[in-house]
Image (cartoon, rainbow, N blue to C red):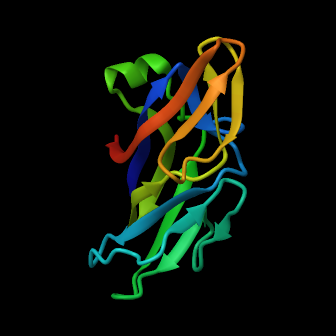
Amino acid sequence: MVLLMLMITADLENLTNLQPQFGCNDPDFSYMFKVKCGNCGELSQKETCVSLKETISIPRSRGIAHLFQKCKFCGRDGTVAMIEGRGQPLTHSQSQSGKYAPLMLFDCRGYEPVDFLFADGWTAESLEGTTFGNIDLSSGDFADYDEKGECPVTISNLRSTFEVVK
């Protein structure tokens, strides 16, 4: 068993609290990434999508996971389960200092998530308090204007990594 924390960062201009639309534990938010087999190292060709609201009973076990998949190369089974309660939004100060924010914790058995894909369903707040919802980050950036604060707001240079958690 390996616990991997999805860590994100970005360049936030006049924005703070970048996170999934309804918080880091949003049951409807889809996490998309590729998976790598822990046995043979084969990387999936397509992205895998997992969310907190969709669980699968693990065959020959009493456990559940958010992903159960068989490696197409070596035939080994692997699971990924999401663990709620450890995520936090990316703040403006973290962005300015280049630090990463923890988004979601994954319990990985036989598979390892890699290459997280930013998509739609994000939210952020301007430094003046305006909320920007349903942000689509699939193109790699976001730009808008905060009428209340009379300033441009942008998200750019999106980056993610998976870190081992003990």
Q: Between residues 159 and 83, which one lies in front from this camera angle?
A: 159
Q: Is residue 110 left or right of residue 65?
A: left
Residue 23 against residue 28 in the figure, above or below: above
Give the quarter of the image for residue 74.
Answer: bottom left
Q: Position of residue 12 (x, y in %)?
A: 47, 27
| Closer to us: 91 or 12 | 12
Residue 88 place in picture, x, y as percent: 54, 30
Compared across the picture, whether 140 is left or right of 42 comes to right
Residue lying farthest left?
Answer: 40
The total number of labels drawn is: 0
Is any atom of residue 125 visible in this view?
yes
**Residue 69 against residue 66 in the figure, above or below:** below
Residue under the point 57% across and 23% down: 152
Above-or-below relation of 44 to 103: below
Q: Residue at x 49, y 68 (%)?
A: 79
Q: Residue at x 39, y 45 (%)?
A: 160
Report the quarter where the N terminus lies.
bottom left
- Quadrant the C terminus occupies: top left
Along the line of sight, which residue is nearer the eye, 20 or 164?
A: 20
User: Which x, y percent locates residue 142?
Assistant: 55, 39
Asked if one can make out residue 110 in the rendered structure from this viewpoint, the answer is no
Image-based side of 35 in relation to 50, left or right: left
